[in-house]
Image (cartoon, rainbow, N blue to C red):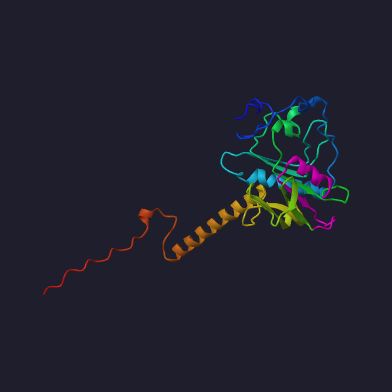
Amino acid sequence: MSSALPRSGSPAAPVEGAQWVLGPEDEPDLDALITEDDAPVDNLFTEKQQRLLTESLSSSWEGPGEGRPFQVMSNVGLFNKNKMPPLVPDCMLVLDVSAAENLRAKENRSYFRWVVGKAPEVVIEIVSDRRGDEETLKKGDYARMGVPFYVIFDPDDLLGGGALRCFVLEGGRYRRAQQEWFEAVGLGLTLWQGAYEGARETWLRWCDRAGRVIPTGAERADEERRRADDATARADRLAAQLRALGIDPDAPEASRPQKPAPKKRGKKGH
């Protein structure tokens, strides 16, 4: 592992393979940085959408591979360089970075690229009005930061480019992706119509290669409950069939009537 990795108990550390060098100009005084300003989220739909994106992965996704951690977060400051204001993505996913032990420490309160050592793999911006610069300034900033996949979710098509647009970084610039699947991440995105926390909307959901959405914790619990109910129903039907044949399925097996063994047929004499 690189000698530049933080020590135990310090900021979240990338797994082996991350390489970076910090110059004096890149070592900021973290105490002087404003990591949060307590500004409210812009609307209730966005707040629920952010939670749907983060909670489903945290509850149900096994990650990009064995032994590879990940973090998914929303509405957290993303600092690229010292003395530059942060971006605040609606959702970002980063692979191969373990969670910090002390989230209240200053160096762990936001995502400092010079501390973590890499850009997030996926950044998602949710359009709520035409003033967010998702298609212009933010798109350029994420490209310069080196974010491999940039996603714009525009549920009301305020920017006129469609509800869902995914971009892949090539040669320092974003190219519109032909599909909403991120091979390097092992995840995709899809639009899903349904109810989440009592609100029926068209939501942005993570999905697997087959297009199946990554379930929330509540959805996974419901599915497990349905499977258990189905197994109980099958057992009840089998028990009813046995009783119809005069067999008590609750009786010990030794006391159940046994089918008589077939009689052996002797050889006929010549």
For image coordinates 77% across by 38% down, the residue present is: 76
Q: In this view, does 114 lie to the left or right of 127?
A: left
Bounds of the magenta segment: 135-161
Hey, which quadrant is residue 17 in on the image? top right
For image coordinates 66% across by 43% down, the residue present is: 58
Quarter of the picture containing the N terminus is top right
Residue 261 against residue 142 in the figure, above or below: below
Whether residue 19 is visible = yes
**Figure label count:** 0
Q: Is residue 60 left or right of residue 238?
A: right
Whether residue 196 is visible = no
Residue 68 against residue 197 in the figure, above or below: above
Residue lying at the far right of the rendered structure = 131
Residue 238 image point, x, y percent = 48, 61
Residue 255 image point, x, y percent = 36, 55
Residue 195 against residue 95 in the figure, above or below: below
Quarter of the picture containing the C terminus is bottom left
In depth, the one of 51 and 105 nearer the eye is: 105
Residue lying at the far front of the rendered structure = 171
| 219 in the magenta segment | no
For image coordinates 42% across by 55% down, the residue present is: 251
In depth, the one of 266 and 119 nearer the eye is: 119
Residue 49 against residue 77 in the figure, above or below: below
